[in-house]
């Protein structure tokens, strides 16, 4: 029996709506399998800025640190807000990722067959598509942003008559190696193929990235690998998605490619993620789990958000941080069942049919879990 502590950070916009459904599913798992999950609920993002003055307070951070896992909803600015100085909601994510050393962001893309018709691709292109992105998450262009330090600037420089801006894409060899190894390790348990995505025809950081991949690949003779330029990858993802297995890439490329890849499932609301480092928990690895989408201000508060990405993130939490593989697989199966039964939130529904709401979708998953 697992006795685990989970910190829930619902955040902004649709974050609280989808997280509530993921938490209900975790409660159903707790009940069905006899586990005990102690849940702490804390503010993050714009919600925390409004109530506590910062995107994530030290107290919240400490509560996360004392947990086995973090279940995260979404954070986000109000439309048009937060372009100037002052705290920004996104800072919460950057702090969590950096300070907890979450360098590997797993984003599985597994379009259920019943959703092939909902994708913007023709169904025949989706046959056999089942891939996982390993996005580097704690270095690269994003981390010129937090602090401007010599050699790693990210700033706008305004001087009379000439304004310029700079961002720095910096990777150490060690930062590349640990995420590439994570990708090869994952490939060993799958079909054994890694696609490393870079822009080595332009960027020095990508040339180093390739060198490291070549070296690491030597330790994995059973895994085949290829290098692919990011622009070609963007094209091939929607031409022949079934050709991919594990895709490893740097932070910003991974951010962009995974929003694109979400369309293989028909909606960004379907994709979960796990952000992992090296800290061990009693059952697995300490991690942060969130759907890949944002606060979706255009649909917030309307019961329109698809909660399945958040629910599938809870499944990843069970698997990676609590070591509960059977329970994780049961949640994933329950999601497949509700999709196969034809339940659709508005993002996936066919025109002319009435979609189910966020909470109703959550109830269907709980029901499918209780009575498989
Ligand atoms: P978004 O992901 O919030 O929304 C993009 C589009 O997808 C919108 O049309 C939205 O309605 C739709 N969508 C998103 N989630 C959905 C769901 N669960 N079900 C159905 N439809 C869904 O991206 P955006 O609008 O570019 O960004 C809004 C804010 O969210 C920004 O402030 C951004 O920084 C933030 N953001 C946060 C995260 C995160 O918390 N990890 C991720 C991405 C963006
Ligand atoms: C994501 C988001 C974040 C990112 C934003 C909110 C900073 O888009 O988690 O994919 O770019 O990493
Ligand atoms: Mn993103």
Image (cartoon, rainbow, N blue to C red):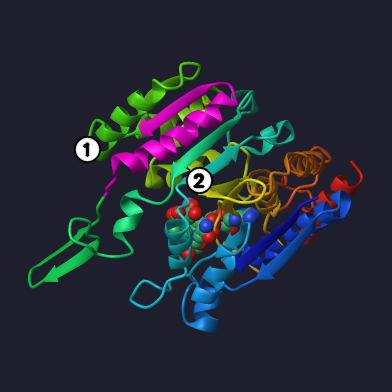
Residue 271 falls in which quadrant of the image?
top right
Mark 1 CB near ligand 2 (8 Å cut)? no
Horizontal arrangement in the rendering, residue 226 relative to residue 121 (left or right): left
The residue that appears at 55% across and 24% down in the rendered structure is 188
Q: How many residues crowd around disc 1 within 10 Å: few (fewer than 14), some, or many (20 or more)? A: some
Q: What stretch of residues is rendered in magenta? A: 169-197
**Residue at left offset 71%, top offset 66%:** 39
The C terminus sits in image quarter = top right
In the current view of this chain or complex, which residue is farthest to the left?
A: 161
Toward the viewer: 196 or 70? Answer: 70
- Secondary element under disc 1, as helix, strand or loop, is helix
Q: Residue at x 67, y 69 (%)?
A: 40
Q: Is residue 317 magenta?
A: no
- Ligand 2 closer than 8 Å to the CB at disc 2? yes
Q: Which residue is mark 1?
A: 204
- In the image: residue 306, left or right of residue 333: left
Tell which circle, 1 or 2, labels the residue nearer the N-terminal end: 2
User: In front here: 3 or 292?
Assistant: 3
- The quadrant in which residue 296 appears is bottom right
Image-quadrant location for residue 339: top right
Q: Which residue is mark 2?
A: 105
């Amino acid at each position: 029996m697992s006795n685990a502590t989970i910190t829930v950070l619902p955040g902004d916009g649709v974050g609280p709506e989808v997280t509530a459904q993921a938490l209900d599913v975790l409660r159903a798992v707790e009940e069905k399998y006899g586990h005990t999950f102690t849940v702490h609920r804390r503010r993050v993002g714009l919600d925390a800025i409004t109530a506590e003055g910062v995107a994530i307070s030290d107290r919240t951070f400490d509560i996360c640190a004392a947990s086995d896992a973090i279940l995260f909803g979404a954070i986000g600015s109000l439309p048009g807000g937060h372009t100037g100085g002052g705290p920004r909601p996104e800072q919460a994510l950057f702090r969590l990722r950096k300070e907890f050393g979450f360098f590997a962001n797993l984003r599985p893309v597994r379009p259920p067959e019943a959703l092939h018709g909902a994708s913007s691709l023709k169904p025949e292109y989706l046959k056999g598509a089942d891939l996982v992105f390993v996005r580097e998450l704690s270095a690269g262009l994003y981390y010129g942003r937090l602090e401007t330090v010599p050699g790693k600037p990210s700033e706008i420089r305004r001087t009379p008559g000439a304004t310029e801006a700079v961002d720095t894409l910096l990777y150490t060899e060690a930062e590349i190696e640990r995420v590439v190894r994570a990708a090869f390790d994952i490939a060993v348990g799958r079909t054994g193929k890694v696609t490393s995505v870079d822009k080595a025809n332009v960027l020095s950081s990508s040339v180093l990235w390739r060198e490291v991949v070549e070296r690491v690949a030597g330790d994995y003779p059973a895994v085949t690998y290829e290098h692919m330029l990011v622009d070609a990858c963007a094209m091939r993802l929607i031409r022949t998605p079934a050709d991919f297995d594990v895709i490893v890439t740097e932070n910003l490329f991974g951010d962009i490619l995974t929003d694109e890849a979400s369309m293989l499932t028909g909606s960004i609301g379907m994709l979960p993620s796990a952000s992992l480092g090296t800290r061990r928990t009693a059952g697995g690895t300490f991690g942060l789990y969130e759907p890949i989408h944002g606060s979706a201000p255009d649909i917030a508060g309307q019961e329109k958000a698809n909660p399945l990405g958040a629910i599938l993130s809870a499944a990843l939490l069970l698997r990676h941080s609590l070591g509960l593989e059977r329970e994780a697989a049961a949640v994933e199966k329950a999601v497949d069942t509700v999709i196969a039964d034809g339940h659709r939130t508005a993002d996936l529904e066919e025109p002319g049919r009435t979609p189910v709401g966020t909470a109703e979708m959550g109830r269907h998953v709980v029901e499918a879990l209780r009575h498989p």
